Amino acid sequence: MTDRTRAADDLTALVAQVRACRVCADSLPLGPRPVLHVSPTARLLIASQAPGTRVHETGISFNDASGDRLRGWLGMDRETFYDSSRIAILPMGLCYPGRMPKGGDRPPRPECAPLWREKLLACMPDITLTLLVGSYAQAAVLGPGRVEDRVRDFRAYLPRYFPLPHPSWRTGAWERRNPWFTAEVLPALRAAIAPLLAPSRQVTTPPQRA
């Protein structure tokens, strides 16, 4: 057995444990359904917030309008985006956390990342660049700070990280008020990810599907 095959087997076993997790079951309004897309050969990691309701229903990360916006930023089609041999998608919270009383999704469950994140990352040694999508991912990795400041100063975090705003519907108005994002950040983002997308010939684990 090669090291790569062993890593794939270890990751497959770990993902089975993750998908069986019920630690937060009593706090999740729709029940547990961990959603993640991982592979031992992935070189690009998308670190996001937590699944929304449509993602919970389908079991496919960013399978909603925010995913369309993110793929537009990346200049990437769905087939490439969901090719887990090249791209891993690992939210800070793996299950849908519910809604806030005044609207908007709740933060990722605080139990989730400490339980699983480092174990999963340890099984993905080829990760070269991590896209920190939204405030929760950025706070977890970089500490306190403003999303807009970090996005504007994205070069300071390269080559390991690339901070991005969360691609919600609210971000459309923010983009119009901040044309530098389209003019400066997106070309640099696409240039940073392009070298990481060469097809892998290594053993991979399949993404979750509905």
Image (cartoon, rainbow, N blue to C red):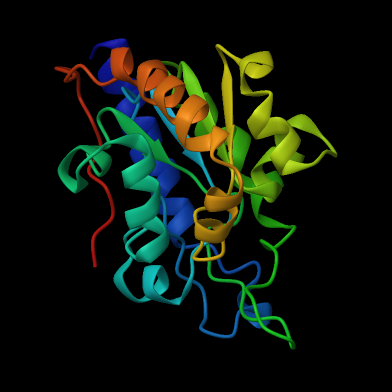
Q: Quadrant of the N terminus?
A: top left
| Residue at image coords 20%, 37% | 80
Q: Report the residue that reaches farthest toward the right.
A: 144
Check the picture and name the quadrant holding the C terminus: bottom left
Question: Looking at the picture, how far across and down is residue 135, in whole percent?
Answer: 69, 48
Left or right of 36 on screen, residue 91: right
* Viewer-closest of 112 and 197: 197
Query: Would residue 86 be visible to someone looking at this image?
Result: yes
- Residue 27 appears in which quarter of the rendering? bottom right
Give the x, y percent position of residue 47: 53, 41
- Horizontally, is 21 left or right of 198 in the view? right
In front here: 62 or 42?
62
* Number of disc labels: 0
Judge by depth and name the residue closer to the eye, 109 or 175: 175
The image shows residue 57 at horizontal and vertical percentages of 35, 76
Is residue 54 rendered to the left or right of residue 86?
right
Residue under the image location 59 percent in, 14 percent down: 158
Residue 37 appearing in the image: no
Q: Nearer the viewer, residue 205 or 84?
A: 84
- Whether 143 is drawn above or below 157: the answer is below
Residue 84 spot, x, y in % from top left: 27, 37
Residue 209 in the image: above or below residue 157: below
- Name the quadrant containing residue 39: top left
Residue 44 found in image quarter:
top left
Q: Is residue 126 left or right of residue 99?
A: left
